[in-house]
Image (spheres, helix red, strand yellow):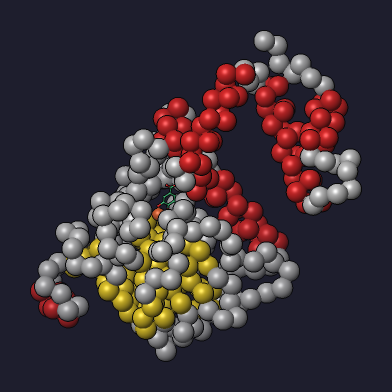
Amino acid sequence: MPTNLISDADKKNLANSAAGIDSDKGDARTKAVTAQLLYRLMQVIDECDVSMDEFWAAVAFIGKAAKNEELGLLVPGTALEHFLDLRLDEAERLAGLNGGTMRTIEGPLYVPDAPLSKGEARMDDGTDPGEVFIIEGQVSDEDGKPIAGAIVDIWHANSKGGYSFIDGEQAPYNLRRRIETDEQGRYRAQTIVPNGYGCPPESATRQLMTALGRHAERPAHVHYFISAPGHRQLTTQFNFTGDKYLYTDFAFGTREELVVTLDRVVDADAIRNAGLNRPFARTTFDVVLTKERANVPQTVVSRAHVTAG
Ligand code: DHB
Ligand code: FE
């Protein structure tokens, strides 16, 4: 079929009409965004000559993803969650705000209210056969002043790439902890080196990635929310040098500033000093928070989460 069968003006009129633009009832913001979305969708359909079969296949695909509670996977996989980060980065830059640790995507697998402890935490329940991993770091402000009492909320996958509450194989809150920084702004976690995460084999997201000729894998990563009174909350992650998927993360979460190196500790004295009895991996992840400021979009995101209940 030929493309662009319908004039731009007709598309705009139809989209505006469907978005209730000619009515003074309803919500102005919803109307404005709906009108733009429909207009642009009509453009895509017309320019790409989307057939009726293709259109209804797309509707069914989104329906399947929603039914599987996979929309939170599709958003990072289609780079939209990273795009929202890029917009926030730029808004901060324009407001003259800089010097903080780089943000990256939250992803769909956070669970609120993880166990809270002071200074340090053991994150794994001792059943994971993976490599012991010590994460140490310090939270400070833009001026280099340590922030005591910051909450470092960490979550990550196990050595098979699975998350507690999601894979159905782990104890509740395994590999999920909140640590309050000590007087020097420091925190320490003992955990297990995570493996990368791959979208489930039958998932709508993996189906789309395959159709796009992409893989559906993430490099290994450790997620963070860091918050402290008077400071902008930070959502971030770190990845590891040398990871097979480091620069092809299907969720677009990798940022060069957030790649850390794993040190392998094999020295018997160092192992004993760490209170351990076998070789382990360690890394440092320091965090700089920027101070709370007016007229910059906030960083605390209101979104649905998996809940522990
Ligand atoms: C997805 C999974 C993650 O663990 C993550 O951090 C981000 C995205 C996903 O399945 O889309
Ligand atoms: Fe993740």
- In the rendered image, is residue 98 in sight? yes
Quadrant containing the C terminus is: bottom left
x and y, in percent, of residue 203 in the image: 40, 37
Identify which residue is drawn at 12% across, 68% down.
278
Q: Tell which residue pokes out farthest to the front in this image.
A: 309
Q: Nearer the viewer, residue 163 or 246?
A: 163
Q: Is residue 63 above or below residue 116?
A: above
Horizontally, residue 266 falls left or right of residue 34, namely left
Q: Is residue 291 above or below residue 164?
A: below
Quadrant containing the N terminus is: top right
Quadrant of the image occupied by residue 207: top left
Q: Nearer the viewer, residue 43 or 274?
A: 43
x and y, in percent, of residue 14 in the image: 81, 30
Identify which residue is drawn at 85% across, 31% down.
13
Q: Tell which residue pokes out farthest to the bottom in this image.
A: 183
Q: Is residue 34 above or below residue 52?
A: below
Q: Is residue 217 above or below residue 265?
A: above
- In the rendered image, is residue 240 in sight? no
Identify which residue is drawn at 75% across, 33% down.
39
x and y, in percent, of residue 232 in the image: 59, 72
Quadrant of the image occupied by residue 153: bottom left
